[in-house]
Image (cartoon, rainbow, N blue to C red):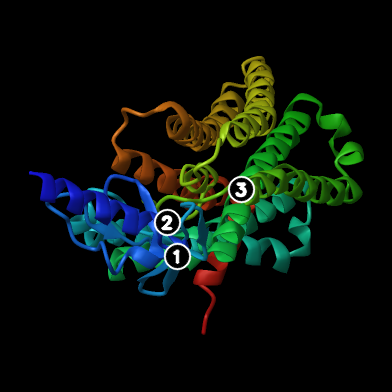
């Protein structure tokens, strides 16, 4: 018994006499001098020491991604990995079929609307100019997200560098805000045309249309930029995998290891003061329009106006319902299935651009006649 005790004491003294040249960590979290690691790398039955495992900075590579992890567990992310729709990986190739069709329809339809409005000077009026703005915004909004989404569906998880991810996030949210602003401008245009037709030509001038276009771009940039800056202040120390098809604000923020309360508060406030206020004003405009329509003496005029306004209202309701449901469930819907959230987040960016050229373009007689003229033009 005594020799064993003496051996343990001598072993402990040898550890204390070692020069500290760096620190390692054993399995129970006790720090030992690195210089002695060669002498005590195995368990001593007499002393009861555990095996020491040095912790060194390491680099983990995942395809094109490089993530550095240091001893203090802080992480410098150089890229993110977008995985697509979680839980539906085996069905993504089939999901891509309707999404591809909708994307092609959105690009072709909105492209035709822009071509018709730009090519005919007789259509350089407020209503048609707003339609052209909406068509351009729809094409950009689709193109920012859908091609990458289809690439993920076809080839699997796709890496995206940190600056590219922030750039995509900026344009997704900025174009969504500008879409909402254009819908508000179009609702106001219809309100003036139906409720105060005598002031339409004098009030909605070309100068005002230009100012409206500049204002909606300025608003989008001013609202989205602080959100990007709030992302830049975050410290990422967790995984760099985003279970989504594109980079969006809360999807990136939730990977951070410090508090994202400020990001969430700003995002919620900005959404309510921009798109939320737009929706209220659009609803008010169409309520005034419908009240005026029901007062028209001609039944035929009432039916025609109600059919047009009804189609517009349906598109607006789809746009804002999908957008707000996706927005709030990302923040408060912890019990909503992840694949439902991701599919809705893609649909609210793809469905309105697909339907807008049909509802606003095909139902507008002048644009419909020009498009049919282009299709029937002799070769």
Residue 236, placed above or below residue 143: above
Residue where numbered disc 3 is placed: 231
Q: Which residue is mark 2?
A: 240
373 relative to 188, above or below: below
Distance CA(mark 3)–CA(mark 1)? 18 Å
Q: Which residue is mark 1?
A: 67
Identify the residue at horizontal 50%, vertical 54% (top origin): 247
Where's residue 349, x and y in %? 49, 48
Q: Quote the CA–CA distance across marks 2 and 3.
A: 14 Å
Of tags 2 and 1, the one toward the viewer is: 1
Quick one: 126 or 333, which is closer to the camera? 333
- The residue lying at 42 percent from left, 70 percent from top is 65
Q: Quadrant of the N terminus?
A: top left
Name the secondary structure under disc 1: strand
208 to the left or right of 350: right
- Asked if residue 379 is positioned above or below residue 192 in the image, the reply reads below
């Amino acid at each position: 018994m005594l020799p064993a005790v003496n051996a343990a004491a001598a072993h402990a003294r040898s550890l204390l006499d070692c020069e500290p040249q760096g620190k390692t960590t054993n399995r129970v979290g006790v720090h030992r001098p690195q210089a002695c690691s060669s002498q005590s790398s195995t368990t001593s039955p007499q002393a009861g020491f555990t095996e020491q495992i040095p912790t060194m900075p390491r680099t983990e590579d995942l395809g094109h991604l490089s993530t550095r992890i240091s001893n203090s567990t802080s992480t410098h992310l150089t890229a993110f990995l977008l995985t697509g729709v979680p839980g539906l990986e085996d069905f993504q190739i089939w999901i891509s079929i309707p999404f591809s069709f909708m994307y092609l329809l959105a690009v072709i339809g909105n492209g035709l609307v822009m071509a018709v409005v730009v090519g005919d000077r007789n259509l350089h009026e407020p209503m048609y100019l707003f339609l052209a703005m909406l068509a351009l915004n729809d094409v950009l909004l689709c193109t920012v997200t859908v091609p990458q989404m289809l690439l993920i569906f076809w080839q699997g998880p796709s890496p995206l560098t940190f600056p590219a991810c922030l750039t995509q996030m900026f344009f997704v949210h900025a174009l969504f805000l500008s879409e909402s602003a254009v819908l508000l401008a179009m609702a106001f245009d219809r309100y003036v045309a139906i409720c105060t037709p005598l002031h339409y030509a004098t009030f909605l001038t070309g100068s005002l249309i230009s100012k409206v276009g500049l204002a909606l771009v300025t608003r989008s940039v001013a609202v989205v930029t602080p959100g990007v800056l709030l992302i830049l202040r975050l410290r990422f120390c967790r995984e760099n995998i985003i279970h989504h098809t594109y980079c969006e604000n809360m999807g990136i923020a939730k990977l951070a290891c410090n508090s994202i309360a400020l990001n969430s508060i700003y995002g919620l406030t900005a959404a309510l003061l921009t798109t939320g206020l737009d929706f209220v004003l659009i609803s008010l405009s169409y309520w005034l329009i419908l009240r005026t329509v029901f007062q028209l003496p001609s039944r035929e005029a009432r039916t025609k106006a109600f059919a047009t306004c009804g189609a517009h209202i349906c598109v607006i309701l789809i746009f804002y319902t999908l957008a707000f449901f996706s927005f709030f469930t990302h923040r408060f819907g912890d019990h909503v299935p992840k694949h439902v959230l991701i599919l809705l987040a893609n649909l609210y960016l793809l469905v309105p651009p697909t339907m807008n050229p049909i509802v606003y373009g095909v139902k507008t007689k002048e644009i419909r006649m020009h498009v049919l003229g282009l299709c029937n033009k002799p070769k």
